[in-house]
Amino acid sequence: GEDVEQSLFLSVREGDSSVINCTYTDSSSTYLYWYKQEPGAGLQLLTYIFSNMDMKQDQRLTVLLNKKDKHLSLRIADTQTGDSAIYFCAAKNSGYSTLTFGKGTMLLVSP
Amino acid sequence: DTGVSQDPRHKITKRGQNVTFRCDPISEHNRLYWYRQTLGQGPEFLTYFQNEAQLEKSRLLSDRFSAERPKGSFSTLEIQRTEQGDSAMYLCASSATRQGSNEKLFFGSGTQLSVL
């Protein structure tokens, strides 16, 4: 089955860019997602990318996909303290209806 | 539209008791999912419904776990004879999906279960 891996922790200063990385194993994954989770809360969908794209930009968020290496990244420009949270990468194969999540990357933004 | 709603937010129970959680999806979302999240882990898929039909339940953790969505709207997740290892956050998500389209899951805030 699908396996999704993420680095566990990232610390940046306010105003810097943050880059969170993710790798997945199933080359037939068709959609890849980024979710944000704040303490004690559910998951908030941030953005997604279809596997036939290599980049998607949405305001401060940029998603890059390297399908050959099965590598996905989320770049947050001008990171703010309110961006501190856990970020989850998730992959979906069109033949299945479930998302497979990574363990999450904790982003800590210091003033 | 108030989003996905889960009740209760927190549940503390004693080992061996039964618990039931409720999820109200976004209205007109035809799919409803249950996930479990333990500390330091990503959400783990349990089961899902399309309307009232439960299409996948092999990932339920044991036969102590069951879920229903009787009228294709709200859903309940029941855990019988709870064990300490069942302590986790139980997340519900819903989506409005069409064949072949991108499926965006919207999550509720979860029910945090503590089994003493």
Image: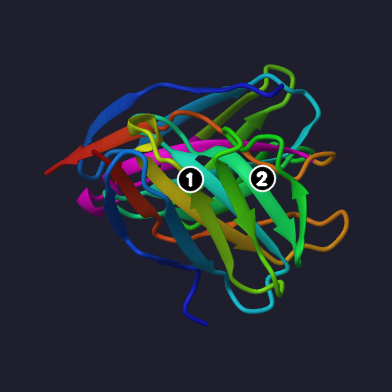
Q: Position of residue B113 (x, y in %)?
A: 33, 47
Q: Which residues are magenta?
A: A74-93
The foreground one among A66 and A84 is A84
Would residue A88 be counted in the magenta stretch?
A: yes
Residue, x 87% and y 54% (percent of image)? Answer: B100
* In this view, A39 is above or below A89: below
Q: Position of residue B23 (x, y in %)?
A: 51, 65
The foreground one among A80 and A28 is A28
Could you say which quadrant of the image residue B54 lies in? bottom right
Q: Position of residue B5 (x, y in %)?
A: 45, 70
The amino acid marked with disc number 1 is: Gln
- State the separation of the CA atoms marked 2 and 1: 39 Å
Residue, x 82% and y 41% (percent of image)? Answer: A94
**Element carrying mark 2:** strand
Residue where numbered disc 1 is placed: B80
Looking at the magenta stretch, what is its main secondary structure? Answer: strand
| Label 2 neighbour load within 10 Å: few <14, some 14-19, many 20+ | many
Q: Chain of mark 2?
A: A
